[in-house]
Amino acid sequence: MYYLSIISWVVVGITAFFFHQFKYPDFPWISHAKLLSGYWILGAGVLAQLEYSIFEKTYKTIATDAHYYVFNEKISYRVIESFFILTIAPALTLLLVLTRYQGENTSSEHMIQELTYLIALFVSVALVCAKIFGDMLKKDTHTILQSIQKIQKGTYIVDIEVHRADELGEISSAIQAMGAEIDQGIGKVNTLNKEIVTTQKEIVYTMGEIAETRSKETGNHVKRVALYSKLLALFYGLSEEEAELLKLASPMHDIGKIAIPDHILNKPGKHTSDEFKVMQTHAQIGYEILKNSNRPILKTAAIVAAQHHEKWNGSGYPNGLSGDNIHIYGRITAVADVFDALGSDRIYKQAWGDESIFALLKEESGKHFDPKLIEIFFNHLNEFLSIRNSLKDCMNHHNSI
């Protein structure tokens, strides 16, 4: 259709030329040529507008094609040319003609009215064209600003529907590229953060298992204590984030045992008073090892290491804290640790049966343990037993309740 319009415009222009020559044979040939050139100039402007409209509808789907930008730049120049042809050039030409007629005193009132009308017409066209281009500019600018706001809010991959060969087009392309680079960079940072967290978890579990291995205990102890602690924390009312943090930190509760001499740590019988005092130092030693870290997991682990042997009635160690003065992390880990330790074979004892374990927990509620936590434990006993059964130690044989 576009090429048909070009052919029609050329044919009609030539036809008009010969018709004008036939109708007005007395006119000099230059007048006929002016008519033809004027018609063709007007047609060139109209067709440039038509060409741009067809281009916008057809080529937006291939905006990533390199040919798009070349053609877009070309067509933009054509539109600017058509704007000049349809507005400024005719207005200046008519103004010069009017000035000439007035200077030669050959103008009539009728001629002045017609020229004034034509000038007003072309100025109106110029204003309409300016309004159209202004609206296009406003729309594209608004689209770019919306994309910037999306990036500010965290949506970094943006599709800016602005396809121009001018500065706005370059800005939109740059914004899209910037958003993609930011998204890629954040993706890398998130991946690194996940790797750091994963590494921290592995280190925490490994260090916990090292401490347990030194005391001839199984690494499953720290895994069970971690799961018990999270379950107690959730039932107590802590957030998922807090419960998960405690789960990750609780395996470090006995990390201070790495500083206890082997002959005390692995003594098969009961400790003497002096030996027990040395044994008690593992809580403070664990705290000293971990206290200087600013990482949430290790900060929590420091609290757990320091306070998991404190007792509700204040008779625990190392600081004799009581009641709510003991951090909830320490109170929770105390229940989880004792429940699992009593049910496990140790070098200094055999595993207790369930009835004996439950009797001691009830007896020590309000003395050794936070009574609310003991109540929670028995209200959800089956869930704790399920964890224990899923991570059994081969040498342990628990009596079912």
Image (cartoon, rainbow, N blue to C red):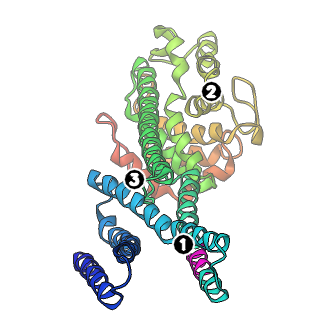
Which one is in front, 77 or 217? Answer: 77
Residue 255 position (above or below residue 229): above
Q: Dot 1 lies on which element?
A: helix
Which one is in front, 368 or 133? Answer: 133
Q: x, y (%) of residue 270?
A: 53, 18
Which one is in front, 309 or 297? Answer: 297
Span colored in magenta:
118-128
Q: Answer with mark 2 or mark 3, whichever residue precedes in sequence.
A: 2
Task: Say which mark, if any, is on residue 215.
Answer: none
Report the mark closest to the observer, 1 or 3: 1
Disc 1 target residue = 129
Disc 2 target residue = 294
> Do the numbered discs 1 and 3 sit on residues whose CB atoms are within 8 Å?
no
Residue drawn 59% across the image and 46% down it: 242
Disc 3 target residue = 386
Q: CA distance from mark 1 to mark 3?
A: 78 Å
Q: Is residue 207 left or right of residue 390?
A: right
Q: Dot 2 lies on which element?
A: loop
Q: In which quarter of the view is residue 375 placed?
A: bottom right
Q: Look at label 2 and name its amino acid.
A: Asn
- Image quadrant holding the C terminus, namely bottom left
Residue 11 position (above or below residue 305): below
Q: Would residue 257 be visible to someone looking at this image?
A: yes
Report the mark closest to the observer, 1 or 2: 1
